[in-house]
Image: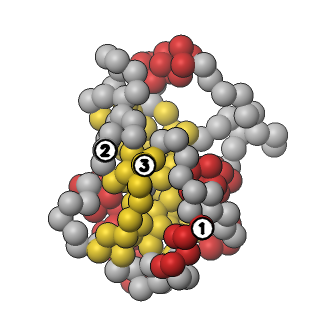
């Protein structure tokens, strides 16, 4: 099926966010022993100035994996093999604010795990305009956002099962 790459105007996107949840796809990047996670400092709301995973809105007719690959490339410059992505779950994310004044953020978030073979692969990262920095965090770091902590727990449990 052909992906509709139609980009919504701010007015259309605001209205969509005002009346309905959006579907988003995120990629959580881990080191090979799953002890560290690479997070990205956001420049925009929600979660402005917080470290979080990369990802974004699913486009019409786009597959989840294709969206994960696209968002990872757009936001970090990383191009990865889709066979190395692992689906890990779905999360309901609701925030009191968004990029639009008086409109909260509600996303049904589908998230994937990607294991970076070498931690120094981050030298290839080229951030987009939504992020100001990135860094590795130990998965037990208390400063990690609670939703990312919840996703880490699920990922670690899923990896133990396999």
* 158, 13: nearer the viewer: 13
In front of the other: label 3 or label 2?
3
In the displayed structure, would residue 4 be above or below residue 113?
A: above
Label 1 crowd bin: few (<14), some (14–19), many (20+), radius 10 Å: few
Q: Determine the secondary structure under disc 2.
A: loop
Quadrant of the drawing holding the N terminus: top right
Q: Earlier in the sequence, mark 3 or mark 1?
A: 1
Label 2 crowd bin: few (<14), some (14–19), many (20+), radius 10 Å: some
User: What residue sits right under mark 3 in the picture?
Assistant: 132
Name the residue located 62 percent from the left edge and 49 percent from the top edge: 74
The CA span between labels 2 and 1 is 22 Å
Name the residue located 39 percent from the left edge and 40 percent from the top edge: 43
Provide residue 94's location: percent of width, then percent of height.
32, 37
Residue 9 showing in the rendered view:
yes
* 61, 147: nearer the viewer: 147
Label 3 crowd bin: few (<14), some (14–19), many (20+), radius 10 Å: few
In the displayed structure, would residue 83 be above or below residue 89?
A: below
Question: Picture quarter containing residue 47?
Answer: top left
User: What residue sits right under mark 1 in the picture?
Assistant: 124
Name the residue located 67 percent from the left edge and 63 percent from the top edge: 79
User: What residue sits right under mark 2 in the picture?
Assistant: 49
Most distant residue in the left direction: 142
Q: Which mark is residue 147?
A: none
Q: Earlier in the sequence, mark 2 or mark 1?
A: 2
Q: Determine the secondary structure under disc 3.
A: strand
Provide residue 32's location: percent of width, then percent of height.
47, 83
Most distant residue in the right direction: 2
Q: Earlier in the sequence, mark 3 or mark 2?
A: 2
In the displayed structure, would residue 89 be above or below residue 43?
A: below
Provide residue 78's location: percent of width, then percent of height.
62, 62
């Amino acid at each position: 099926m052909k992906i509709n790459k139609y980009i919504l105007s701010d007015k259309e996107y605001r209205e969509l966010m005002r009346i309905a949840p959006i579907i988003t796809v995120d990629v959580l990047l881990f080191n090979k022993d799953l002890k560290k996670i690479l997070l990205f400092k956001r420049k925009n709301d929600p979660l402005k100035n917080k470290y979080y995973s990369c990802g974004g809105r699913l486009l019409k007719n786009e597959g989840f994996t294709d969206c994960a690959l696209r968002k990872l490339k757009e936001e970090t410059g990383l191009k990865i093999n889709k066979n190395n992505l692992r689906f890990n779950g779905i999360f309901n994310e609701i925030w009191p604010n968004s990029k639009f004044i008086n409109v909260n953020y509600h996303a049904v978030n589908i998230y994937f795990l990607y294991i970076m073979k070498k931690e120094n692969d981050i030298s290839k990262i080229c951030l987009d305009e939504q992020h100001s920095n990135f860094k590795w965090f130990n998965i037990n770091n208390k400063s990690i956002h609670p939703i990312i902590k919840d996703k880490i727990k699920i990922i670690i449990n899923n990896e133990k099962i396999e």
